Amino acid sequence: GDRLVVAIDGPAAAGKTTVASAAARRLDALFFDTGVIYRALTLAALRHGVAPEDGLRLAGLARHLDIQVKPPSQPDGRFYDVWLEGEDVTQQLRDPEVDRAVSAVSAHPAVRRALLDVQRRIARSGRVVLTGRDIGTVVVPDADVKIWLDASLEERARRRQRDLAAQGIERSLDEVMEEMERRDRADAERAIAPMKPAKDAVVIVTDGRSVEEVVEEIVRLAGGG
Ligand code: C5P
């Protein structure tokens, strides 16, 4: 059948979205970033006054999360818009408040359990490239291709700093590095579905490599191009 799952995991700002979306285009596959689900839940929690520590209420929110993914309203290189409770929140998902709370929200076992089905449904929908932290290890352990995409902390912090600046948010490199390291540590050290490479993942470190080169390697591993 015409099924393909490419799982791309890795730490924050490793370039997963850039590389995965380009690879998806080349492989005639759907691209989906599972991080938006955790971010949408975190935004919903912030708005409804649910604390990032309150696993019980968060899991309740997760089970009833009113999230929709729609074609992009602006032709600015976005892949899709994300709607939460009837409102386009694509930009708010990148708010620093969400960045700060998302790891704590994502660490609750009941939250992850509640969000597993929707991710697996997407994974089974046809040809897909999925990005996240636990796609190759937990969400789709039988994925056709597993990639662990990484880059040095400094390189990743520079990229994140650039992305923030594009949103009009000026941050020092040290500040960005510290926050990113904190989030990566929380994601890697949580008890359930910690961020880590699958045993059979191909590790790609992107420092000093072009996007095209990395995309080419992934397309080749997926048997395309
Ligand atoms: O990839 P992104 O930075 O948007 O992910 C935001 C957060 O969502 C991560 O730091 C992590 O806590 C959580 N996440 C996760 N599992 C995934 C994707 C994201 O725990 N598959």
Image: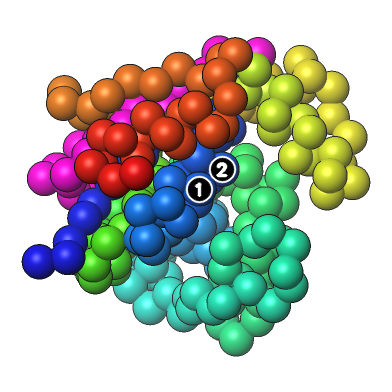
Q: Residue at x 23, y 52 (%)?
A: 5
- Residue 46, given in percent of the width and then of the height, sits at 62, 61
| Circles 2, 1 touching at the beta carbon (< 8 Å) | yes
Say what amino acid the circle numbered 2 marks: Thr
- 12 is within the stretch colored magenta: no
- Residue 154, given in percent of the width and then of the height, sits at 65, 13
Between marks 2 and 1 in the image, the one whose residue lies nearer the viewer:
1
Q: Which mark is residue 193?
A: none
- The residue indicated by pointer 1 is 22
Give the residues drawn in magenta, as a range: 137-154
Element assignment for label 2? helix
| Above or below for 67 versus 209 | below
Q: Residue at x 62, y 43 (%)?
A: 99
Residue 87 seen anywhere in this rendered image of the structure: yes
Q: Nearer the viewer, residue 77 or 12?
A: 77
- The residue indicated by pointer 2 is 18
